[in-house]
Image (cartoon, rainbow, N blue to C red):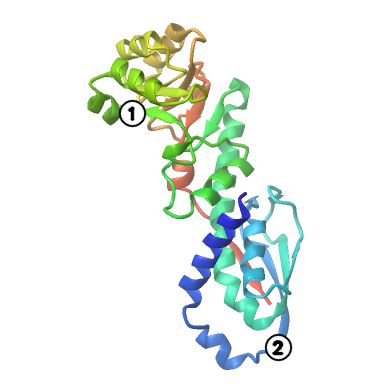
Amino acid sequence: MNHLMLEEIVRRALLEDLGWGDVSTESIVSESATASGVITAKAPGLVCGLPVAENVFHLLNPETRFLTEVAEGARVSVGQAIATVEGLTRVILGGERVALNFLQRMSGIATQTAELVEAVRPFGVRVVDTRKTTPGLRLLEKYAVRVGGGFNHRLGLDDGVLLKENHLRAAGGIAEAVTRVRARAGHMVVIEVEVTDLAEVQEALDCGADAILLDNMDRDMMRKAVSMIGGRAVVEASGGITAETVSDVARTGVDILSVGFLTHSYGSLDMSLNL
């Protein structure tokens, strides 16, 4: 994880929450008072975001001690201690909610990802995320997918070529779109084309696409598309993939499953911090 980008994200979150200061805490706790607090799991799952939570407290005061009780990516049970924070009481209370927000959300994503990865393990297919992330938190959410055993799709629009429906309409078709990209992009750039039917699959193959994204196809059409492609391009399935359907999609023989709900419809993993 890029530490400069991480610090910027954490700093913005602290400024949002603290504003001009913690009125409640500063009214009742002296500047010199110290304490320790324990972060505890209130639900079972994978822990993710420990370095982020540590950064929260260190930005408020570099002398704060953040002692992890489990490793990043460890599976925890209800009531299990995750980390201990030691230092100024004002710092612990001032960073509590921001640290928990990061930990709970990232752990929820990692836990959900791990469940999908396990479900498709017999099929040798990769589970990847999408760009459907919370604005400003993409780096952390995609990191959480990796901790859960998944893989990242593009981090941003500058990270690869994916020619989707609107690109193809703007260019006048698959062939023209691929031709324009090849004329502009370097030889190291992989070109992926989104298709919706078998005719478009053939057109993408004829253009020499490196990867083909099967968008919202039914299972039968997916199997036919995989057979047509015959290993000449990486095959990705996308659109409407859920925890209930992921195994059926994986059985079609695709190489990659891109799953938007990993980062746009996840449930947070409940945690608490108590002094």
- Dot 2, how many residues are within 10 Å of its Cα: few (below 14), some (14-19), or many (20+)? few
Kind of residue at badge 2 = Ala
Residue 219 shown left or right of residue 29 in the figure: left
Q: Nearer the viewer, mark 1 or mark 2?
A: 1
Q: Position of residue 113 (x, y in %)?
A: 56, 40
Residue 143 shown left or right of residue 237 in the figure: right
Q: Quadrant of the C terminus?
A: bottom right
Q: Secondary structure at mark 2?
A: loop
Q: Position of residue 79 (x, y in %)?
A: 69, 61
Inspect this view and state whether residue 269 appears: no
Upstream in the sequence, badge 1 or badge 2? 2
Q: Position of residue 262 (x, y in %)?
A: 49, 42
Q: Position of residue 84 (x, y in %)?
A: 73, 68
Reading the image, the residue beneath label 2 is: 33
Residue name at image x 70 percent, y 72 percent: 62
Residue name at image x 76 percent, y 60 percent: 69
Reading the image, the residue beneath label 1 is: 164
Seen in the picture, residue 85 relative to 30 is either above or below; the reply is above
Kind of residue at badge 1 = Lys
Residue 233 shown left or right of residue 219 in the figure: right
Residue name at image x 45 percent, y 12 percent: 226
